[in-house]
Image (cartoon, rainbow, N blue to C red):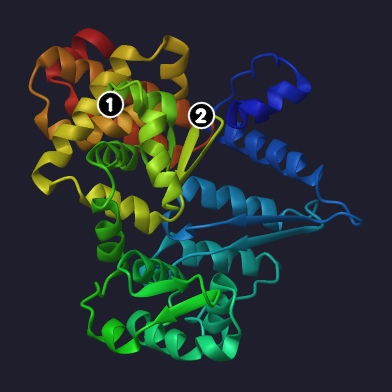
Amino acid sequence: MIVDVLPQVELIIGKQAPVPPLPPTEARNRFQMVFQQFVAVFGREDHPLALFLDDLQWIDVASLKLIEHLLTNPDTCYLLLIGAYRDNEVNPAHPLQAGIEAIRQGGVPVTHLALAPLAVADLNRLTADALHMQAESCTPLTRQIYERTGGNPFFFTQFLSSLWEEGLLLHDAQHRGWQWDLGRIAAKDFADNVVDLVIGKLRRLPAGTQYILQRAACLGGKFDVRRLTLICGQADVENLLAAAMHEGLIVCSGGTGKFLHDRIQQAAYSLIPQEERSQVHLYIGRVLAAKLTPDELAEALFDVANQFNRGAELLLEREEKAQVAQINLHAGVKAKGTAAYVSACWYLGAGMALLEERDWEERYV
């Protein structure tokens, strides 16, 4: 059960026998029980376990139910779960709100911490640390940036970096310090939106790197470098990514890349013209379906299905529609096998929507 969702565990415990099939409800209960026992292995009185989950505003219902079961189970001990989400994207009707309330009703203490923008004093310590200067001498610069960024830490660091890139923050080698002109900074027409600011940074990268990052953004916040190489058809993908790594936009390790912030991924994706995005996703789906090995395709099934679905409006040929429908149906069955029933229904529905009536009768009835 665990190896199915965390394949790396097989490297520790060895090859596992297939999981006996069960009806849907029993399969879900079994998965929740086994996963709870798995987590309990690591939470000890002398060594408690802390888990951090980011971007809960995008959580699916099946994952939320698993978290609810994990936290409210009386056998779960010495576990601290920290979740972060954007409260402006979670309204009262959002499933996360109901999930949090269910966890509280289950007797689990829930603490809310509203993360306000950083204060000038906090940001000034960041500036002083970055410039290796005394905090007092950095205060005027920090206040100037604070007024333009509202205390958002990511926006703040991007703005500070942009000052250096624009030549408004200069290193004085003779006096071993930094200099700036507050008047010129105030007069500079910087973007008021963090995405626009990052877009400007992306546009200063080599054209090849911009192209690679656009395709990487289509794959998500994390991306497989080999799949990206297949999509782009270039052998020097890693060299092109190096420029983005140097700018602190992505990090790559062990064949996997990651955007350092979802706003960076958003900015890279926005470089693709709106009218071309469906075509790009469809192209990515076609390349992955054609060039991945059967084992790789099975591992990337959800990703391939998602690419096709985002370009489904451009599918015209009956055979290709049937192929994409089959990929969605397989993804639905796979999701059902891990008790992700909402996702399973979505993929099954997407697959059925692509099939003409005669295809449905011929292939699947």
Please provide percent x and percent y for residue 307. Answer: 28, 32
- The residue at the point 30 percent across, 36 percent down is 212
Rate crowding at label 1 as few (under 14), some (14 to 19) or many (20 or more) other CA atoms within 10 Å. some
Please provide percent x and percent y for residue 181. Answer: 34, 85
Element at label 1: helix
Observer-nearest of 87 and 134:
134
Q: Is residue 236 above or below residue 177?
A: above
Q: In the image, 99: left or right of 146?
A: right
User: Can see residue 236?
Assistant: yes
Residue 226 occupies which quadrant of the picture? top left
Q: In the image, 160: left or right of 312?
A: right
- The residue at the point 75 percent across, 17 percent down is 14
- The residue at the point 59 percent across, 24 percent down is 22
- Earlier in the chain: of badge 1 and badge 2, it is 1
- Amino acid type of the residue tagged 1 in the rendering: Cys
Please provide percent x and percent y for residue 118. Answer: 51, 81
Please provide percent x and percent y for residue 269. Answer: 26, 48
Rate crowding at label 2 as few (under 14), some (14 to 19) or many (20 or more) other CA atoms within 10 Å. few
Residue ranking furthest to the top? 362
Quadrant that contains the C terminus: top left
According to the picture, the residue beneath numbered tag 2 turns out to be: 255
What separation in Å lies between label 1 and label 2 (alpha carbons)?
16 Å
- The residue at the point 46 percent across, 25 percent down is 334
- Amino acid type of the residue tagged 2 in the rendering: Gly
- Residue 232's tag is 1
